[in-house]
Amino acid sequence: MQVDGRWLKHTLDFALSGGRLNLEDATALLEIPLGTEESRAIADAAHALALRQSRQGRIWTAIGVDYCPCPQNCSFCSFGSDWGIVQDSHEWTEEQVVDAAARFAAEGASWITIRTTQHYPLERVCSLARAMRERIPNCPTLVANVGEMSLEQAEMLYDAGYSVAYHVFRLREGTDTGIDAEERLRSLENIRRSRLGLAFLAEPIGPEHTAAEIAREMVRARDLGAVIMGAMARVPVPGTPKAHLGQIPEEKLARIIAVSRLIGGEVAQEICAHPPSDAAVAAGANAVVVETGAVPRDREEIRKEWRGLTMPQAKQLLGRHYPSVAGA
């Protein structure tokens, strides 16, 4: 698609006025060269929309519950059993999970995500929600990041205390992942039909992914009614099949975040960037991630915070671009 200044102004004005960008528009916005005046205009429009919709920075926290080899062998994940990175199995106790969640809550987390591998028992996931709801005063929004689910199981998570499910159709799902693509789509539809809200980031984005591929997942998230959108760059974990391809630069992730904000429009009030950066927050992200425990982007279990990003540091990052930060 040929892009000129008039088209760009019209497209940005259309998005800012509540219009729904289509796949062609989104792809064209992603393809505009970085470091240009047009690139700056996209980021500025996205940040203006973020200030209008959110006006507050928020922190997404995640607790990886089970550190173990996974037979799904997704080509970017350190847990893949065939890669031999994770050789033993370790599961956080309910007490450890609740303690970490309580600490995040006390420090101002907007969301607490329980993340598990594909086959972790759903009954235990539900039990963790009930324990957190019971023992954490003013418990933040609970998010379940678990395996595939039926409509009945999605409702089970809601009844246990989860308000949101993090579930995505990963880039090249079924090829770079060990998950059946059609099964993944069925789970997403089950979440859409349930009482759970959907969080869906375009991920895990690597240098090989095209603008059209990335745009497709952002549009899919919007059309599924995702309440939280955004993007996650793939982290090249040594020893995984995708590691040699490297990582996209911060500037490219920031562009993807900006386009995600413009695509999300009035559907997704919150846009999350992972890994976080000042450029991404300046381009429309109002949420960043602080995580602990089993992290599929690392070779070791994390006992404190992944890559040392603490809650105070996350608040400081968000505070540079938003009038207020939740929990500050």
Image (cartoon, rainbow, N blue to C red):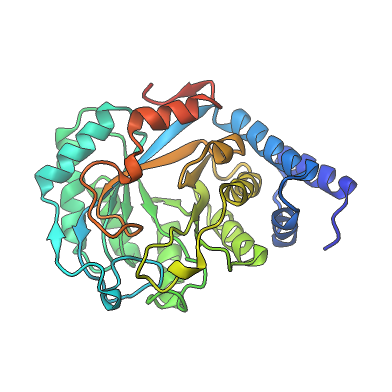
Residue 27 x %, y %? 71, 60
Q: Is residue 169 above or below residue 63?
A: below
Res. 305 image quadrant:
top left
Q: Is residue 124 above or below residue 208?
A: above
75 sits left or right of 268 in the view: left
Give the residue displayed 36% in from the left and 58% down from the top: 297
Give the residue displayed 86% in from the left and 49% down from the top: 7
Location of the C terminus (image quadrant): top left
Give the residue displayed 18% in from the left and 70% down from the top: 87
Residue 227 visible to the viewer: no
Residue 70 visible to the viewer: yes
Res. 50 image quadrant:
top right
Residue 320 x %, y %? 53, 25
Number of numbered discs present?
Answer: 0
Res. 79 image quadrant:
bottom left
- Between 278 and 224, the one lying in front of the other is 278
Residue 115 x %, y %? 29, 54
Location of the N terminus (image quadrant): bottom right
251 sits left or right of 2 in the view: left
- Between 240 and 255, the one lying in front of the other is 240
88 sits left or right of 223 in the view: left
Residue 125 x %, y %? 21, 55
Give the residue displayed 14% in from the left and 67% down from the top: 88
Q: Is residue 127 above or below residue 312?
A: below
